[in-house]
Image (cartoon, rainbow, N blue to C red):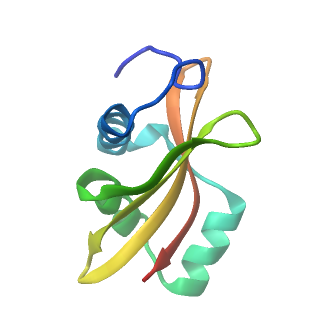
Amino acid sequence: MPKSNVVAIDLSVHSAAKLIKELAECSERVFFSKHAKKRMIERDITRVQILRCLKTGIISEGPAKSVKGNWEITVSGISAGNSINVVTALDKDSNGDYALIVTAYFE
């Protein structure tokens, strides 16, 4: 996994897609916000569906700097036969880059 600080650099669609796929492959660096967990229960979306979307989907929005200083990206894909969108924030902590799932929804 790259050791670069995703917050400090300008993030292109290509580099964001590559990083998201890498993070989803080693899912210990993918975290879920309280909001995302709540919406996943309401919408009957599983962690497996989210990870599959991150691994195989395409960036449909972003990357854009958020007001919190991280990068926000929406990844769209197909999982379990459903079109799914996953809003993801990329950031860095002392262990390296990570993805925070902000929310997920079906189209």
Is 10 positioned to the left or the right of 78 in the image?
Answer: right
**Residue 90 spot, x, y in % from top left:** 54, 38
Residue 83 falls left or right of residue 6: left
Horizontally, residue 66 falls left or right of residue 3, namely: right
Q: Is residue 42 above or below residue 73?
A: below
The structure residue drawn at horizontal position 44% and vertical position 39%, both measured from the top left corner, is 28
Q: Quadrant of the C terminus?
A: bottom left
Tell me which residue sits at (26%, 79%) in the image: 80
Quarter of the rendering containing residue 76: bottom left
Seen at 37% across and 18% down, the residue is: 2
- When asked about the image quadrant of residue 58, the answer is bottom left
Q: Is residue 17 above or below residue 69?
A: below
Q: Residue furthest top?
A: 3
Q: Residue furthest right?
A: 67
Q: Nearer the viewer, residue 27 or 3?
A: 3
Residue 43 percent location from the top left of the image = 53, 85
Q: Quadrant of the N terminus?
A: top left
In this view, 104 is above or below 90: below
Q: Residue at x 50, y 76 (%)?
A: 105
Q: How many marks?
A: 0
Between 78 and 51, the one nearer to me in the picture: 78
Which picture quadrant has residue 33?
Answer: bottom right
Give the vertical position of 21 relative to 55 (above or below). above
